[in-house]
Image (cartoon, coloured by chain):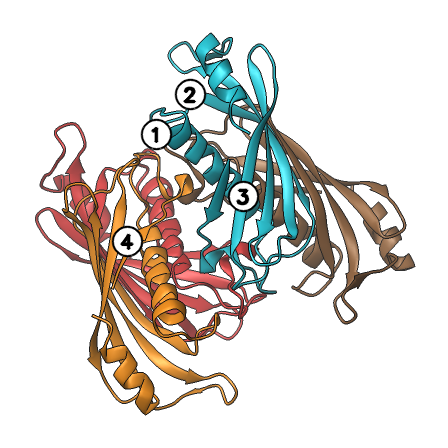
Chain colours: A brown, B orange, C red, D cyan
Amino acid sequence: MRLPLATRYTDYDTKGHVNNAIYLTYFEMARAHAWRDVLGMPDEPSFILAEATVRYVSAAMIGEALEIEMRTGEIRNKAWVWEYVIRCTDDGRTVAEGKTVQVWFDYAVRKSVAIPEEMRAALAAIG
Amino acid sequence: MRLPLATRYTDYDTKGHVNNAIYLTYFEMARAHAWRDVLGMPDEPSFILAEATVRYVSAAMIGEALEIEMRTGEIRNKAWVWEYVIRCTDDGRTVAEGKTVQVWFDYAVRKSVAIPEEMRAALAAIG
Amino acid sequence: MRLPLATRYTDYDTKGHVNNAIYLTYFEMARAHAWRDVLGMPDEPSFILAEATVRYVSAAMIGEALEIEMRTGEIRNKAWVWEYVIRCTDDGRTVAEGKTVQVWFDYAVRKSVAIPEEMRAALAAIG
Amino acid sequence: MRLPLATRYTDYDTKGHVNNAIYLTYFEMARAHAWRDVLGMPDEPSFILAEATVRYVSAAMIGEALEIEMRTGEIRNKAWVWEYVIRCTDDGRTVAEGKTVQVWFDYAVRKSVAIPEEMRAALAAIG
């Protein structure tokens, strides 16, 4: 799944670079797109984040268009991995990459539960 | 009421200035302090914002300690005004000033209601 | 000028509403679009903000697509007004409106200067 | 090194939890404190981030005071690790933990360089 990133002036720090924390927001924008637009789920996610990792490869400067690619990695019983690569649209270089681990969560009983079978298939198709 | 502002690196833009939108967050930090710590109310406010104005007087540069002063202005039947001045702690110059209009709101019935009498007195004491 | 707003999950507060400070960021997104894409200027603006006002008309809930309309208001010697209306795309209702005052600024000498003549015409055309 | 975290209303998402990306900002607040107040360095850092990891242990709810503990981990030739634990001040439970890898960077020549000897000792003392 590929998505152009709508960057904001507030994303950039005093050096003109995208601030390090914003990459997790970019990952979240990709997840929101996958969740709502690809999987057709409601706005509020029914999973929680267990872990997030970002590797900063090259600085993204103000004025550079960015895009994100996201794919599903390993799918376990209750958890799955999403992997991300953020690239500069113009020169194609990698700006950052990372992954997050999600746990399927039943907010009614407030505990993690097994990923529903039909969701496993839908998740596996994101690539 | 006076409060030192805990600034963050993400508050600053590519020119090293506090970003214009962050001043509304600084106003919100003052309101949260007034609401919880001065008025002793719960974390979730029972008012809504109707209006906000900021005048940018001088740029706040990274590394400058900032503080905010907040006082209650006019109190009407359902609404009241809070006024703010943000100053550089070191040289005392004004960085920004503004005001917000709050409306007392009953979230149970989702409509604005008259400010409770004891709250009027408590609000009037913030200065 | 009209622009769909790419909202983010972090824009929403604990009540599911767009946070009050984010509207200034939405205004900034419209300015950035006008500056770069309509006026063809470089990424770093050559103006400073003097004032911003937001009127909160109705709460924007998570899941609602938003769009912003921006037009140039009064143009003075060194300053001009931009006016904004943010609407819910689906039902067309106004969510917030406001204005900002910009001052043309020469960063080399760090003072405000008269708006260049050709820029006055270009600004006037934004509506 | 231990630091109380000045949380903001905008840190919380629609479920009343600290948003996942904000933890990287909390890590950054600890780094800024270490850099300026413990190490006595200027506001602009002379390192770049190479990697960041967050493990989300328990949700931090609005109204809970938070604190962060930060210590230096491994120190290599050009890079070093900082480790973080964020706890709820009242009950002491861990909310999140993580680490970042920093690379000493010479902005004049725009390349990574060996960590200066006296900085190695100062970094090692943060624990």
The dot on residue D46 is 2
Q: Is residue B118 left or right of residue D28?
A: left
Residue on which disc 3 sits = D68
Taking the spot 57% from the left edge, 17% from the top edge, the residue there is D79
Q: Are marks 2 and 1 in contact (CB under 8 Å)?
A: no
Instruction: Report the amino acid beneath label 2.
Output: Ser
Instruction: Report the amino acid beneath label 4.
Output: Ile
Disc 4 versus disc 1: nearer the observer:
1
Residue on which disc 4 sits = C126
Chain ID at mark 4: C
Marks 2 and 1, how far apart in space?
Answer: 9 Å
Chain ID at mark 3: D
Disc 3 versus disc 1: nearer the observer:
3
The foreground one among D79 and D20 is D79
Q: In this view, does D56 lie to the left or right of D126?
A: right
Marks 4 and 2, how far apart in space?
Answer: 42 Å
Taking the spot 40% from the left edge, 35% from the top edge, the residue there is A13
How crowded pointer 2 is (Cα within 10 Å; few <14, some 14-19, many 20+) is rated as: some
Residue D71 in picture, x, y percent from top left: 57, 31
Marks 2 and 3, how far apart in space?
Answer: 23 Å
Instruction: Report the amino acid beneath label 1.
Output: Asp
Marks 3 and 4, how far apart in space?
Answer: 48 Å
Taking the spot 62% from the left edge, 53% from the top edge, the residue there is D92
Residue C76 in picture, x, y percent from top left: 10, 53
Instruction: Report the amino acid beneath label 3.
Output: Ile
Residue on which disc 1 sits = D43
The foreground one among B103 and C89 is B103
Chain ID at mark 2: D
How crowded pointer 4 is (Cα within 10 Å; few <14, some 14-19, many 20+) is rated as: some
